[in-house]
Amino acid sequence: MFLSIKKIPKTNWSSKNPFNFKPKISTFFFLCFGLMLFGLGEGLLIVSLSGASPWSVLAQGISLNVNYSIGVITFLISVVVLIMWIPLKQKPGMGTILNALIIAGMIDLCINFVPSPENFISQISLAIVAVLTVGLGGGIYLVANLGPGARDGLMIGLQKVTNLPIASVRAFIEISVVSVGWYLGGTVGVGTLLFAFGIGPCVALGLYLVDKIFNN
């Protein structure tokens, strides 16, 4: 069952070295494709008007208590998370760099070109699609094995230390983050809760599907 997955699957297009800066074309393609899906999902969640992702709620909550913008806070949070990689023995790779660039670009495309739903049911439906898309994209780019983004690196590092299922570790991180953000004054919506509770299982499902499709 996909909820019990504890390791990132390997395929014939997975990089053997996460610090490889000259990967095969297929590896680079799946890395970028996965990150585009990931960014598309993040953007769709924002467009759905049902609530931002937990990390955005955290950034908003902190910004309400200090004299910095949400953008600056988001950057500082990423720096702090990357520092947390050190005791977890995680290292950045090409995927870590492209993660920030591609996801940011896809979010901007969504905001500029995807119209927001006009009724509540459509908003929630889009939020569900958004979380599933983020999970699938996360599964694909993690299997490429060219270095995770800041949040996913934290997830992988904590999973190795605790040996808990990936779905459980990711859900714990997202729920903790949104709880702190909400306490600090960040806005929480239905979409935020869907993301916090659903992203762990969705990433695990993405990993499961990639494993089944490319290893069978």
Image: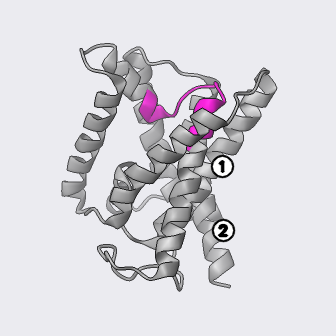
Disc 2 marks a residue whose amino acid type is Leu
- Residue 38: x %, y % from top left: 54, 52
Give the SS element for disc 2: helix
User: Label 1: which residue?
Assistant: 132
Q: Main secondary structure of the magenta part?
A: helix
Residue at (38% x, 63% y) in the render:
95
What residue does disc 2 label? Answer: 209
The magenta-colored residue range is: 42-56
The answer for how far apart the CA atoms under marks 2 and 1 are is 12 Å
Residue name at image x 31 percent, y 75 percent: 21
Colouring method of the image? one colour
Quadrant of image for the C terminus: bottom right
User: Residue 104: within the magenta?
Assistant: no
- Is residue 156 in view? no
Q: Which amino acid, by three-letter code, is at mark 1?
A: Leu
Q: Are marks 2 and 1 in contact (CB under 8 Å)?
A: no
Residue 181 % position (x, y) = 40, 24
Q: Residue furthest front?
A: 113
